[in-house]
Image (spheres, rainbow, N blue to C red):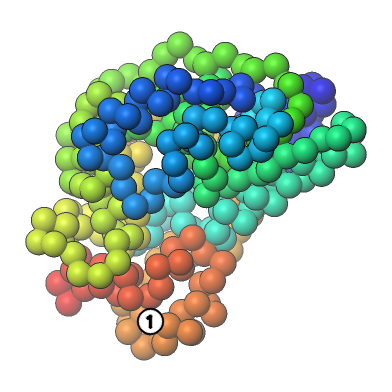
Amino acid sequence: MKKALIEFCKAINIEGVGIASSGPYTDLKDVWEKRIEKGFANAFDKGSLEKMICPDLTLEDAKSVIVCLFPYYCGNFEGSNLSKYAYAVDYHMTVKDMLEKIGDFFKKNIEGFNYKAFADTGPLNDRYLAYKAGLGFFGINNHIITDEYGSYVFIGYIINNYPFEPDKPQDRTCRKCFDCVKRCPGQCILGDFTINPFKCRSYISQKKGELSAEDMEILKKDSLIWGCDVCQDVCPHNQKVKKTVIEEFKNNLKYRIEYEELKEISNKEFLRRYKDRAFSWRGKGVLKRNHEIINEL
């Protein structure tokens, strides 16, 4: 069945697929307990620690986790003010749709197959799963890095009740050049494979409401009004990477939003235009605010 999984994934343009065990992930628990002690858990961290380390709390009869990579790099665009991951239509929809195709395939081929698919919003830790499934290795910047696509990958997973044989993690890390540490606008990368999320420029760009003086200074260090690509742009593992083979991430790209547009349209019109984009969930106000801070409008 594992061979059938790999072949089916290739047929729908998923080149990276591996298997993680069904836990419990005691090594991840140790890492996260230390992170919580340092006060590095943030508002975007999802669910409880118990659910993060025990897949059977989400799917009672969990036996394994199918983990898939979805490369999204489609090139650099001069004058862009959006993070690369947000150029195409919302990856949550694309990834979830492809994962459901895998689930449907096995429902037809394995009697009693049961599963739950997640694209970024699930209870487990996506990057940890990709590492455990042998799909990539950790960088100092806390990203998962792959040989072909660097760190420009989305991660999706399927908790399921079939005992696929787990893959082995790669016994390596990034080159440890520390370029990401030196160049990070908020100096949030600590050099020990952990980050302080509250100083991450991408995190700050997505915060609602009024920003602190420190947040604004960090935001001003780059031109993107949504997200931040600095630690990925300077990473040697991301030089000369392959472009995505996934059609949804190659077409209908939007890599810039002008201030004049945000100023003139209503919230309702903003959502009508951009409801299928990953940057739309915070509404136009956050993007408009970021524009004003960065460009001192």
| Residue 48 vs residue 18, the one in the foreground | 48
At x 38%, y 51%, the residue is 44
Name the side, left or right, on which 35 lies relative to 131: left
| Residue 104 vs residue 114, the one in the foreground | 114
At x 35%, y 25%, the residue is 31
Which quadrant is home to the N terminus? top right
| Residue 187 vs residue 75, the one in the foreground | 187
User: Callout 1, which amino acid?
Assistant: Glu
> In the image, is residue 61 above or below residue 98?
above
Q: Position of residue 83 (x, y in %)?
A: 39, 54
Name the residue furthest left. 213
Name the side, left or right, on which 176 lies relative to 161: left
Q: Tell me which corner region of the image, top left, top right, bottom left or bottom right, holds residue 227.
A: bottom left
Name the side, left or right, on which 145 lies relative to 215: right
At x 82%, y 44%, the residue is 104
- Judge whether residue 102 can be spotted in this image: no
Q: Tell me which corner region of the image, top left, top right, bottom left or bottom right, holds residue 78.
A: bottom left
Name the residue furthest top. 171
- Judge whether residue 57 can be spotted in this image: yes
| Residue 4 vs residue 250, the one in the foreground | 4
Q: Kindly identify which residue carries mark 1.
A: 261
Q: Position of residue 3 (x, y in %)?
A: 79, 21
Which quadrant is home to the C terminus? bottom left
Total label count?
Answer: 1
Mark 1 nearby-residue class (10 Å; few <14, some 14–19, many ≥20): few
Q: Position of residue 215 (x, y in %)?
A: 16, 57
At x 52%, y 49%, the residue is 121
> In the image, is residue 81 above or below residue 5?
below
